[in-house]
Image (cartoon, rainbow, N blue to C red):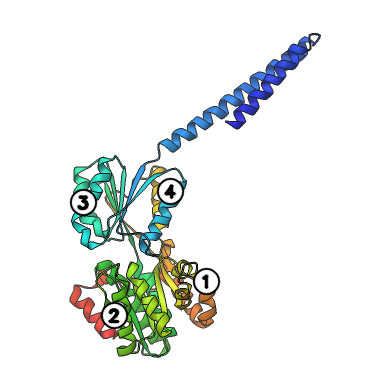
């Protein structure tokens, strides 16, 4: 609009000069008319561009992001960070916090509510997959995006997709780190609610520990516990303290959402190392009211949830519809999982360990090194045996 006004002003001044100069030649009058016409044309183009941009912004789809609770400094917050970027780009994004599992009977009502409000896309984690798959049949004009789940194509309606992250690959790298940094020969992996995705974290972590042992002649053991909730840091703290006292564990990997705060608290009290998950949890805590928790977080296994949302909606905006009815798998090769390599990590982890981890990362991304996955097991009995053998 400013450009249009300035151009119009130039045109008006040109015409004014012609009108005031009664003795101006025909040549001058013609030049002024030409300049005015050009200015008017440019102004019209600018106005058309502004109108087109406004229309483009108006056409951005409406997105409902459905999560349990924000504030976990981890999984849900990573997704919200991506949604904030989409908001800045002009998308109408509404975040719905449904609460923990005690509110599960209301989950469907929350999703129905945003559908009835006309939201075009429903983005929700594995917790809501069954509900979304059912509603996708009832609302064929809406699109449903489940993330952190690994459904086969025959399970997915045509208006639904899954984003599956290779958390086993990133967990393998921090498993190597835990084994290398342990002084007692025992490391922990502590989870919130056990499910296939969480078991995939555990599988990759154990695989990394075992491969470190094989390559370095060590015998580091892994102990595992689950607190049964994503929002119970007190129980998580108690589990970690038990692992310190009863198992002599000294490096802990948390895969527990908001419950993970209890693991960090226990590590601060006991002087043990911790590994965060999903987001850069060192960065989250260093600027918080509890910065001392950052001082025990060697690194965090990254799962780029927010970035995956941005990438997906950019693809949709460009006209790509190949994702519907299919699961998208994102791992190290797509730079969608990994670990935090910050100054704290570099200061506290020996160079030879950092080099070994980076070499493994390159091999996994290229396909030279294949990481074991929970989905490789025939059943849970086989997975449980794998965990027990690691301890």
Q: Secondary structure at mark 1?
A: loop
Q: Earlier in the sequence, mark 3 or mark 2?
A: 3
Which label lies toward us, 3 or 2?
3
- The residue indicated by pointer 1 is 342
Q: Earlier in the sequence, mark 1 or mark 3?
A: 3
Residue 51 coordinates in the image, percent (x, y): 49, 30
Residue 371 visible here: no
Q: CA distance from mark 1 to mark 4?
A: 27 Å
Residue 32 coordinates in the image, percent (x, y): 72, 17
Residue 201 coordinates in the image, percent (x, y): 32, 71
Residue 82 visible here: yes
Q: Secondary structure at mark 2?
A: strand
In this image, 262 relative to 13: left or right?
Answer: left
What residue is rendered at 35% in x and 86% in y?
249
- The residue indicated by pointer 4 is 86
What residue is rendered at 22% in x and 42% in y?
139
**Quarter of the image containing the N terminus?**
top right
Q: Earlier in the sequence, mark 1 or mark 2?
A: 2
In the image, residue 337 above or below residue 5:
below
- The residue indicated by pointer 2 is 224
- The residue indicated by pointer 3 is 108
């Amino acid at each position: 609009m400013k450009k249009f006004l300035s151009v119009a002003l130039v045109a008006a001044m040109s015409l004014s000069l012609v009108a005031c100069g009664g003795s101006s030649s025909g040549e001058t009058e013609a030049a002024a008319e030409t300049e005015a016409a050009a200015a008017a044309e440019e102004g019209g183009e600018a106005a058309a561009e502004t109108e087109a941009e406004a229309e483009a912004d108006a056409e951005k789809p409406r997105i409902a992001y459905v999560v349990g609770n924000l504030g976990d400094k981890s999984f849900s917050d990573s997704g919200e960070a991506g949604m904030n970027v989409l908001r800045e780009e002009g998308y109408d994004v509404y975040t719905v916090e449904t609460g923990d599992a005690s509110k599960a009977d209301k989950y469907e009502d929350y999703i129905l509510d945003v559908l009835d409000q006309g939201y075009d896309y429903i983005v929700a984690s594995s917790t809501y997959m069954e509900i979304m798959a059912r509603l996708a049949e009832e609302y064929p004009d809406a699109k449903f995006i489940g993330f952190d789940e690994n459904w086969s194509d025959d399970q997915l309606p045509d208006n639904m997709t899954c984003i599956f992250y290779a958390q086993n690959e990133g967990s393998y790298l921090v498993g190597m780190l835990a084994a290398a940094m342990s002084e007692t020969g025992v490391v922990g992996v502590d989870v919130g609610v056990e499910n296939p995705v969480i078991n995939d974290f555990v599988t990759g972590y154990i695989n990394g520990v075992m491969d470190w042992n094989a390559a370095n002649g060590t015998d580091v053991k892994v102990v595992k516990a689950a607190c049964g909730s994503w929002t119970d840091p007190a129980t998580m703290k108690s589990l970690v303290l038990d692992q310190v006292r009863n198992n002599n564990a000294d490096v802990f990997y948390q895969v527990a959402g908001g419950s993970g705060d209890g693991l960090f608290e226990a590590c601060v009290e006991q002087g043990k190392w911790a590994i965060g998950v999903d987001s850069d949890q060192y960065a989250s805590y260093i600027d918080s009211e509890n910065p001392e928790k950052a001082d025990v977080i060697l690194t965090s296994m990254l799962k780029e949830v927010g970035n995956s949302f941005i990438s997906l909606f950019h693809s949709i905006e460009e006209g790509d519809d190949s994702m519907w009815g299919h699961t998208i798998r994102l791992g190290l090769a797509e730079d969608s999982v990994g670990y935090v390599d910050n100054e704290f990590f570099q200061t506290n982890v020996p160079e030879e360990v950092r080099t070994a981890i980076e070499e493994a990362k390159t091999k996994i991304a290229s396909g030279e090194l294949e990481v074991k996955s929970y989905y490789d097991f025939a059943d849970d009995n086989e997975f449980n045996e794998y965990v027990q053998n690691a301890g």
